[in-house]
Image (cartoon, rainbow, N blue to C red):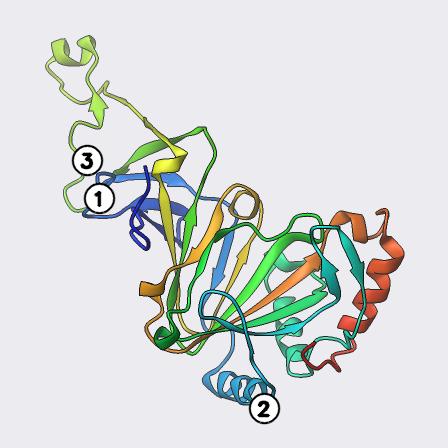
Amino acid sequence: MLFPQGEDNFTYCPATGLAKGNEHSEFAGWAFPFPGVFLTEEFISEDEESEIVELMDRDDWKPSQSGRKKQDYGPKVNFKKQRLKAGSFTGLPSFSKKIVAQMKACSVLGGFLPVEQCNLDYMPERGSAIDPHFDDWWLWGERLVSLNLLSKTVLSMSCDSEDSIQLFPTFSKENGQLSPPGSFTQTSACKNSGKEGINCILSPRLVPSKEVTVAIHLPQRSLVVLYGDARYKWKHAIYRKHIEHRRICVTFRELSAEFSAGGRHEELGKELLEIALSFQGRPV
């Protein structure tokens, strides 16, 4: 079942790590665990945001796909032929040194060493968007780190796999009832005991993964990390309707195991990291 672009039927809740069914969808009152997302608000201050954007705008933005513009700081890559070299890469920009240092405070970013930074500029006037996709697995490691600047947006997660997701009824605090109605079955013992509800068994609901889309709301100046299932099982997208004002996304990527310690191309990885973390770069 395909959804109109931007119509997500679940919303990710950072406080609980659950994807909760949206009020007006058929999944209202249902939820399931959505692992692999770390979200922190106000990762940088308003002043830092202004300064970073001003520095970015001093360099050229190159036209990219789907109405986006970009600035890339990273090695020269041919993903089809799986070839990689430093090329004209001179490192991440100087203003990112502080951002990368602040990441060390995030529990999920222990040992995170970015080897590439991509700045993407989204504007409603250009119809900017990005279709559902996975970031490359051959070169980039598990954690994808994005800083969301200038305006809020929504990251839409979708899944192509043939498996099913087990949904659970959520408990409504207002009336102490399980919601939605009919989400539990009564055993015959339950019906006959006269103490209705004591021995009730909750019935989870199975739905095909393809019918589920999850909205992750990204406030302005928030930092989001995708890893695990959110990186490898779920595709991510940004739809046009969720770009209301200019938005800049700063994404940092680490190297895969193949280019890390003990990997086949460890030496090349080491060389690229040395360049990246000199923080003397200009866009390539």
Q: Quadrant of the C terminus?
A: bottom right
Which secondary structure, mark 3? loop
Which secondary structure, mark 1? loop
Which secondary structure, mark 2? loop
| Residue to which mark 1 is pinned | 25
Q: Disc 3 or disc 2, which is closer to the eye?
A: 2
- On the image, the x and y values in percent for residue 247 come to 43, 75
The residue at 19%/17% (across/down) is 186
Q: Quadrant of the N terminus?
A: top left
Tell me if 224 is positioned left or right of 11 in this view.
Answer: right
In the rendered structure, which amino acid carries the disc numbered 2?
Arg
In the rendered structure, which amino acid carries the disc numbered 3?
Pro
The residue at 18%/8% (across/down) is 188
The residue at 59%/85% (across/down) is 60
- On the image, the x and y values in percent for residue 35 come to 49, 44
Q: Name the residue nearer the viewer: 144 or 194.
A: 144
Specify which label sits upstream in the sequence, 3 or 2: 2
For residue 58, the mark is 2
| Residue to which mark 3 is pinned | 180
Specify which label sits upstream in the sequence, 1 or 3: 1
Q: Residues within 10 Å of mark 3 (few under 14, many from 20)?
A: some
Q: Name the residue nearer the viewer: 10 or 209.
A: 209
Tell me if 219 is positioned left or right of 190 in this view.
Answer: right
**What is the spatial separation of the Cα atoms under label 1 and label 3, in whole angstroms?**
12 Å
The residue at 54%/58% (across/down) is 225
In the rendered structure, which amino acid carries the disc numbered 1?
Ser
Q: Disc 1 or disc 2, which is closer to the eye?
A: 2
Tell me if 14 is positioned left or right of 139 in this view.
Answer: left
